[in-house]
Image: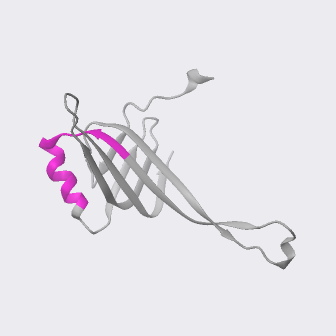
Amino acid sequence: MSDSAGIGSGTVLKIGGFAIAEVHNLSPSIEFDDVQVTDFDSGIWHEYVKGLGGCELTAEAHWRPDTHKSDIMVHLVNTTKQAFRVEWVDGTNWTFSGFLQGFDGNAPNGEALSTTLRIRMTGSLNYDA
């Protein structure tokens, strides 16, 4: 039933312990490589095993030049891994190391300033339920 679906209100994204203000859409993408292990005994079908995994996180936010200008740019040019945390509304937390991979800004005439942040996880994803 659709009435058991949750709402994302209250979800928080943090970089280095500081919350990114006014995030309104958070889209994680977790994917694992597949490794082909087909050999002469496989018959006519390819065989695969699960390979290495990775995660990318896209965050859309209202752009706030008063706070985002310095915070986001510092993280964008920083070349060292940083601590990220996602606090989901159901109480689950994800923590991982990563870096801010990209930044897209948008300044439409007559509408709110917005930004899209692309975050690349490096290493493992830790979560608690």
Residue visible at 77% across and 73% down in the picture? 38
- Residue at the extreme top: 3
67 w.r.t. 79: above or below? above
Query: Where is residue 74 shown, x and y percent of the image?
Result: 19, 58
Q: Above or below — where is 31 with respect to 80?
A: above
Q: Residue at x 23, y 65 (%)?
A: 78
In the displayed structure image, the side of residue 34 where residue 124 appears, left or right? left
Q: Residue at x 39, y 48 (%)?
A: 58
Q: Residue furthest bottom?
A: 40
Q: Is residue 38 a member of the stretch shown in magenta? A: no
Residue 55, position as x, y percentages in the image: 47, 57
Pick the front one: 77 or 121:
77
Q: Main secondary structure of the magenta part?
A: helix
Percent of width and height locating residue 94: 44, 50
In the image, farthest residue toward the front: 109
Task: Determine if the magenta segment contains residue 63.
Answer: yes
The quarter of the picture where residue 76 lies is: bottom left
Up-down: is 22 above or below 73?
above
Q: Which residues are magenta?
A: 59-76
Q: Position of residue 11 (x, y in %)?
A: 38, 37
Residue at x 19%, y 32% (from the top left corner): 109
Residue 46 vs residue 85, the one in the foreground = 46
Q: Is residue 129 left or right of residue 119?
A: right
The quadrant in which residue 7 appears is top left
